[in-house]
Amino acid sequence: MLQGRTIALTEGRRAAELARLVEKLGGVPYPAPAVREVPRTDLGPATAVLGAIVRGEVAVIVFLTGVGTRAFFALAEPQGVTPALLDRLGQMLVVARGPKPAAVLRGAGVRIDVAPEEPTSDGVLAALASHDLAGKSVAVQLYGDDHVAVSDALAGRGARVLDIPLYEWAFPEDETVLERFVADACAGRIDVVAFTSSPQIRHVFAVAERLGRARELTRALDASVTTAVVGPVCAASLVERGITPKIVAPKGTMGALVHAIAESLS
């Protein structure tokens, strides 16, 4: 168990849920949300893919997040193509990575053809392994600005990938939270920091650089503070900064990361 240790959580969307889990496991949650979701100002690329779907030019679509799935339907509504979109989705292979996009799709009356056992990008790729995608157009609803692993992998299988970028990661509106985190991490007042995406790491260090404490933070996260991450992309972002992640979640979920922290500290 976490035995009263302070666990910094840089995730924003599920901050309250993760904090409750940390408390349940005997730790002290330290909320330090490093990103927030904002709509992209340029929706041209997403609109182009929407048009291709309505014209019947896309065979497969992969929905990765609930936020992105809702945004995609919202994109169709003012253009008056929602009925045509729903009709085309009924003729396509529809993939939902996890329960959140699945819930949005079911609410819209869309049939789900592929739902991986594990709600991760690797789970999506495993679930699609038996499908021949060579030469087919596959639309992938992206999330954030660095999660292109699914697109790259599908392109490697011969698919013609059409990315649907709908939102991106921005700094939190109140950056003093991250300023306090940098100070507390450098001072040894944090036991573990949990990162679930590369933008979180990038934003934390951008604040540290502004404060002139980036090198100090690097030393702290590689020595006195235990770093925990989800996924190889997130881990690589730390390694690039000279920090070796101490804990890597066995599954690509935030809950699995908290449990991995508890197991490691026990």
Image (cartoon, rainbow, N blue to C red):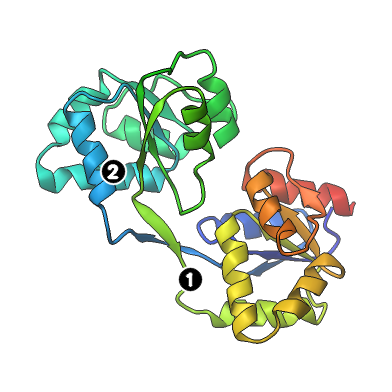
Spatial CA span between label 2 and label 1? 23 Å
Q: Is residue 101 visible?
A: yes
User: What x and y, as percent, mark residue 90?
Assistant: 25, 20
User: Viewed as shown, does residue 175 lie left or right of 85?
Assistant: right
User: Viewed as shown, does residue 28 lie left or right of 79?
Assistant: right
Disc 1: which residue: 171
In this view, 187 is above or below 77: below
The mark that comes first in sequence, 2 or 1, is 2
Please state which of residues 213 and 87 is positioned toward the viewer in this rendering: 213
In this view, 156 is above or below 33: above
Disc 2: which residue: 72
User: Viewed as shown, does residue 207 lie left or right of 168?
Assistant: right
User: What x and y, as percent, mark residue 145?
Assistant: 46, 54
Identify which residue is drawn at 55% across, 35% down.
Answer: 121
Q: Is residue 98 visible?
A: no
Q: Amino acid at mark 2?
A: Phe
User: What x and y, as percent, mark residue 89?
Assistant: 26, 25
Identify which residue is drawn at 54% across, 39% down.
Answer: 149
Identify which residue is drawn at 35% across, 38% down.
Answer: 104
Identify which residue is drawn at 82% across, 54% down.
Answer: 246
